[in-house]
Structures are given as C-alpha cells and as structure tokens.
Amino acid sequence: MTGYCPIGVFDSGVGGLTVAREILKRVPEGKIIYFGDTAHVPYGGRSSKELINFADKICQFLLEQGAEVIVDACNSTSAVALDFLQRKYPVPIIGVIEPGVAAAVSRTKNGRIGVIATEATINSGAHKKAVEKLGLDITVIGQACPLFVPLVEEGKVQSWEALEAAQKYLKPLQQADIDTLILGCTHYPFLVPVLQKVLGPHVVLVDPAVETVCCLQKVVEELPNRNWTGPHKYFVSGDPAAFKRVGSMLLETYSLPEVEKVVLDWGD
Ligand code: DGL
C-alpha cells in the first residue's frame, strides 16, 4: 500500500507533542496534522463551554485539512468535549483519558492511583468516572497542578520552579500512599525527571500517550484509504516561532518542521 493516513492531533500548546512523538515512533503509516491553540493556552482554568467551543472549531479545521482520524491530545478537552465531538463528526476521534486509566489500572499493585491534571480535568472527575466504569475496587486521588502548563510552555521543565511546584503538588498524593500516577495532562510527560525525582522510583508514572497510540494504531489499520502524500504539518493560533523553539527543545531527538499560524473563527 502506498501513501499515508492523515492524523489530526490537537492540544492547547506544546503538550500534544508528547502524543505526536509517540505517533511518530509507532505509526509509520501516519502523517500528523497538528494544531496547538497557543492563543488560548492554558486551557486548564477555562469553562467546559469554552473548551467545547475551542475543540469544535479545531476539529472543523483539522477535517478541512484532510484528517481522517483525530486524536484529542488534551485531557481537559477529552474530559469535557469528547462525547460532543464524537457525536458531531464522522471520523474516529480518540481521547486520552480512558487509555490513561486503562494503563494505570493494569499497573497499580495497591489499588491507589494518583492523577495530576489541570483544574478543568480534575473538576470534571473524568478519571474517577472512567475507573468506576471498569467496576474495579481502586481509589483515585486527584490533584490539580495549575503552575505546570505555563512552566512547560516556557520550556522551564528542569527549573527550580518546576521542582518546588512538584514538591507542593505531589505531597498530598505521597501522603495518600499512591503507587501509580497518571500524568493527566499532555504537558506533564516533559516534567517526568522532576516528578520521578520527587516521588522516587517506587511510584510508576503513566504517560497516557502510549496507550492512546495503541488505540490509534488499531483505528488506522482499519481505515481503508492511504491516498495522502503530503508532509507532517504543524499549525498554531499564536506565535509560531515560540512554539517551534520550545517544541524542538522539548522533543530533543525529533525536529519540528515549519510551524504555520492560522486564524480560526472562534465565534466569540
Ligand atoms: N495539555 C492539556 C491537557 O492535557 C491542556 C493544558 C492547559 O492548557 O492547561 O489538559
């Protein structure tokens, strides 16, 4: 079979690159059409109504660009907008919450899972609901970490500010004796060295990108067309130079191609 499958991927900013990186590693027949909504980052403190509107307009854009499957690489929109998007659009749309939960429940030994995420995600209770749906006797302890996304967007992933914030946010989870931690925001895998340093090696960190891309692989295998011949494409709603600079630094071994600014009609 020749040609590629165009995969739409979106997030508020550079966080979705943790999912894009996994796609590049494991879905060779995929081409990424990425949208980082950097004009609106951070998403974490925004209302469900705003997040649904942003996700809706971004999906429209990705479909116009030719996406045949979309990964909502943002926990905050996966938590509040995924059902809406899946009902509205004719292509498969994959979120990051349920794959992250599936990976965590298979790893925990003491049945105590922590979730660190944005305020929007924690307030939605999406991870707790996903665990309840599985009917397992597992306790989920959530912790919002609003300082993390701005630090990652500035590229300050190894800074003393990141360490200090991690110590503060992780303390209640350590006291709750978690043995597994879901990185419930796609920006957070860039903070793994700091998080693991604070928690120690006995706590398993779960990056939902891995399980999400397993789900994506199955969907891509079933898509009949491989007509796409274009390159990977990266779009942002804010400053393309800042995205490229920070994104390239965070991705280390993967280099980002040109990043283009697009102006969407957000309807507000
Ligand atoms: N990376 C996103 C998430 O997974 C959004 C973070 C934000 O913009 O606050 O939730």
Image (cartoon, rainbow, N blue to C red):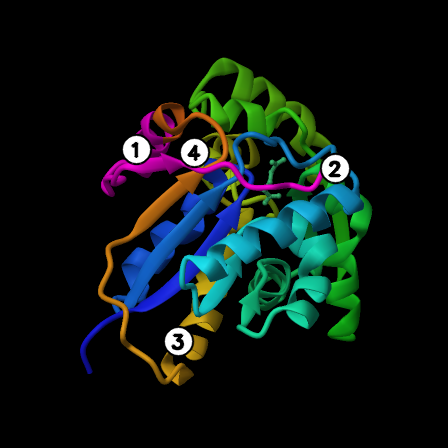
Magenta highlight range: 244-268
Q: Amino acid at mark 2?
A: Glu
Viewer-proximal residue, 210 or 222? 222
> What SS does tag 2 mark?
helix
Q: Which residue is mark 4?
A: 193
Q: Nearer the viewer, mark 2 or mark 3?
A: 3
Q: Amino acid at mark 4?
A: Pro
Q: Amino acid at mark 3?
A: Val
- Asked if the stretch drawn in magenta spans residue 13, the answer is no
Tell me the number on the disc at residue 119: 2
Q: Are marks 1 and 2 in contact (CB under 8 Å)?
A: no
Per the model, the C-alpha gap separating discs 3 and 4 is 32 Å
Q: Earlier in the sequence, mark 3 or mark 4?
A: 4
Q: Nearer the viewer, mark 1 or mark 4?
A: 1
- Asked if the stretch drawn in magenta spans residue 263, the answer is yes
Q: Is residue 200 above or below residue 33?
A: above
Q: Which residue is mark 3?
A: 220
- Give how far across and how far down residue 137 sits, in percent: 78, 69
Q: Residues within 10 Å of mark 1 (few under 14, many from 20)?
A: some
